[in-house]
Amino acid sequence: MPDFNRIASFYDLLKKIVFQSSLDKASFSFLEDIPENSQILILGGGSGALLSYLKKSQKVIYIEKSSAMIELAAKRKFNCSIEFVEADIMEYKFNANFDAIITPFILDCFSETSLLVFMDKLKHQLKNNGLWLQADFYPQNKVHNLFIKVMYVFFWISAGLRIKAIPDFEKLFKKSQLQLIKKVSFKHGFIQSRLYRKIA
């Protein structure tokens, strides 16, 4: 997995300059659908902007490889109970099952092959009828694809991300037999937030 420590201090500013509020809006979408008293897994939550939107009764395990991102997230105001874990999510051994999994703009850090394996691992940690909130890039045209290539070059230089093409998320979620409940789009469909349910 890439190391975002070098860009943590200015990542939120960069995100705002390039995408305005679209990435945050996508990340926050459907949080209200997560029931009270849920056990929630957040992977790659960055500086933790979404934490203030979670409920007091909810318990969160927040896994992030970047120690700098965890430090920023821990300084935010939030009501839910949170355990911050600095770890590589590919190597982390889960010892709990979850009512909801949130993956905001993290699945694009995987190759399609490794993501399919990782999603299968995560699916087994999701309870039956559990929710999976996914926000990421869904390129719709050549301009979007060019932007993705530029973005991957930037993160290769700045964070050591060795990915050249964005996975086909729609295909992979179908293979994982997760049911799409609803979705919302931003920037002409380029950025999407999708809510899936694990069918018992």
Image (spheres, helix red, strand yellow):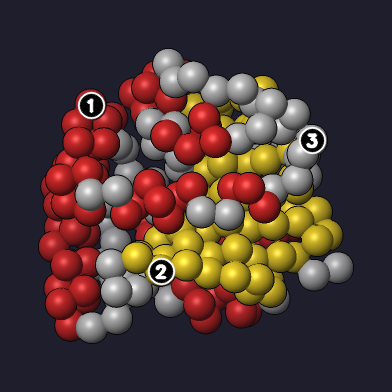
Q: Position of residue 108 (x, y in %)?
A: 38, 60
Question: Which residue is disc 2 drawn over?
Answer: 185
As shown in the figure, which amino acid type bears the numbered disc 1? Ser
Q: Position of residue 113 (x, y in %)?
A: 47, 71
Residue found at x 75% / y 65%: 198
Disc 1 residue crowd, few under 14, some 14–19, many 20+, Cα 10 Å? some
Question: Which residue is disc 3 drawn over?
Answer: 37
Q: Position of residue 75 (x, y in %)?
A: 42, 16
Disc 3 residue crowd, few under 14, some 14–19, many 20+, Cα 10 Å? few
Q: How far, Cα to Cα, is label 2 from label 3?
A: 28 Å
Q: Is residue 69 left or right of residue 178?
A: left
Residue found at x 71% / y 32%: 58
Q: Is residue 73 left or right of residue 10?
A: right
Query: Which mark's residue is nearer the viewer, 2 or 1?
Result: 2
As shown in the figure, which amino acid type bears the numbered disc 2? Ser
Image quarter hosting the C terminus:
bottom right
Circle nearer the N terminus (3, 1): 1
Residue 81 seen in the current view? yes
Asked which secondary structure carries label 1, the reply is: helix
